[in-house]
Amino acid sequence: MASLTAGSTAKIAAGIVIAMLVANMILFALKKIQGLVFWLVIIIGALIAYFILPKFASR
């Protein structure tokens, strides 16, 4: 079994964040979520991308 390197872990985490944000935009466009939830998810995604993902990449 191959072990995950820091770069591949960061890529997987980034892919998950991107998928979460795309799903968020689709749900908002279909009026399944409200504006407040939409913006909260956007802010959480931005915080993850700015603070947490660089720590994965630097390991």
Image: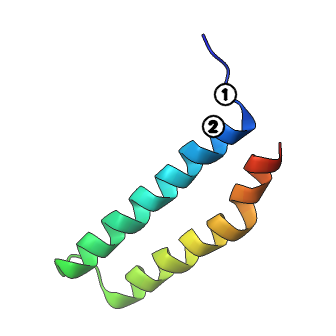
Q: Which residue type does callout 2 highlight?
A: Ser
Residue on which the image places disc 1: 4
| Residue appearing at x 60%, y 10% in the figure | 1
Residue on which the image places disc 2: 8
Task: Reply above or below: 49 against 19.
Answer: below
Query: In the displayed image of the protein, which residue is found farthest to the right?
Result: 59
Which disc, if any, is residue 57? none
Closer to the camera in the image, 31 or 3: 3
Looking at the image, residue 2 sits to the left or right of residue 16; the answer is right
Closer to the camera in the image, 4 or 28: 4
Check whether the beta carbons of the residues at disc 1 and disc 2 lie within 8 A of each other: yes
Q: Secondary structure at mark 2?
A: helix
| Residue appearing at x 83%, y 42% in the figure | 59
Looking at the image, residue 19 sits to the left or right of residue 43; the answer is left
Looking at the image, residue 6 sits to the left or right of residue 49; the answer is right
x and y percent of residue 38 in the render? 39, 81
